Amino acid sequence: MSDEIKGLLKDAESRMQGALQSLTADLSGIRTGRASPALVERLQVDYYGVPTPLQNLATISAPEPRTLTIKPFDAASVKDIEKAIQSSDLGINPNSDGKVIHLNLPPLTEERRRDLVKHMHRRLEEARIAVRNVRRDQMNDIREYEKEKLITEDDLKRGEDDLQKLTDKFVEEIASLGQNKEKEIMEV
């Protein structure tokens, strides 16, 4: 196989890996039955007019299975953090003593679990589309190389087959992540 094809496949794999990492980060923020700092750490807080991830503004911990504790580095940001939590789609009201914010997570209802699964499936489809877009772009590049006579027709076929195998591998990983997360969400 030519160096051009190897380079394209390596690039495709790194871009597909990026889509998978983004999906993994998004899925960690989808709420399950227990409290996890990942639920709120990427929440954008308007801090002095600049949208800032909550994890940059506070220490987030889960002292109990259904409780999150947020201790801001700057006590002046407590109100901003509370506002960001209330305006998010988490459906949680923060309790604050002026220095620390407590989030008590209510048990998930069956309807809320189904909504979370629907949201998760939309996110899974976005990740699959991202992987397929990488495949399409690289497939076009491989065909362009063949048109310009940089690679042979055999290299073209081999490159297309390898690219399809790589795409299938990542789509399977996405499906596996989705199945595991769905079990986690639906677990009572």
Image (cartoon, rainbow, N blue to C red):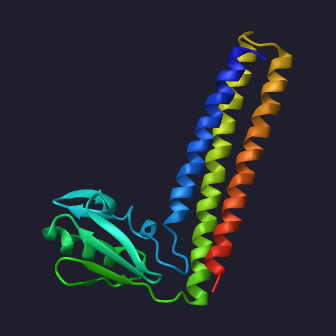
Residue 135 in sight in this render? yes
Task: Please identify the residue farthest to the front as the structure is shown.
Answer: 63
Name which residue lies at 24% across and 63% down.
46
Q: Is residue 8 left or right of residue 84?
A: right
Q: Dividing the picture into quarters, in which one does residue 51 lie?
A: bottom left
Can the viewer see residue 144? no
Q: Position of residue 10 (x, y in %)?
A: 65, 29
Above or below residue 185? Residue 43 is above
Q: Position of residue 157 (x, y in %)?
A: 84, 25
Q: Position of residue 184 (x, y in %)?
A: 63, 74
Q: Is residue 109 left or right of residue 62?
A: right
Report the residue at 52% width, 70% height from top.
30
**Residue drawn at the location 33% of the way across and 61% of the way down:** 55
Q: Nearer the viewer, residue 5 or 21?
A: 21
Q: Tell me which corner region of the image, top left, top right, bottom left or bottom right, holds residue 132.
A: top right
Q: How many marks?
A: 0
Task: Tell me residue 126's x, y (percent).
Answer: 60, 55
Q: Quadrant of the N terminus?
A: top right
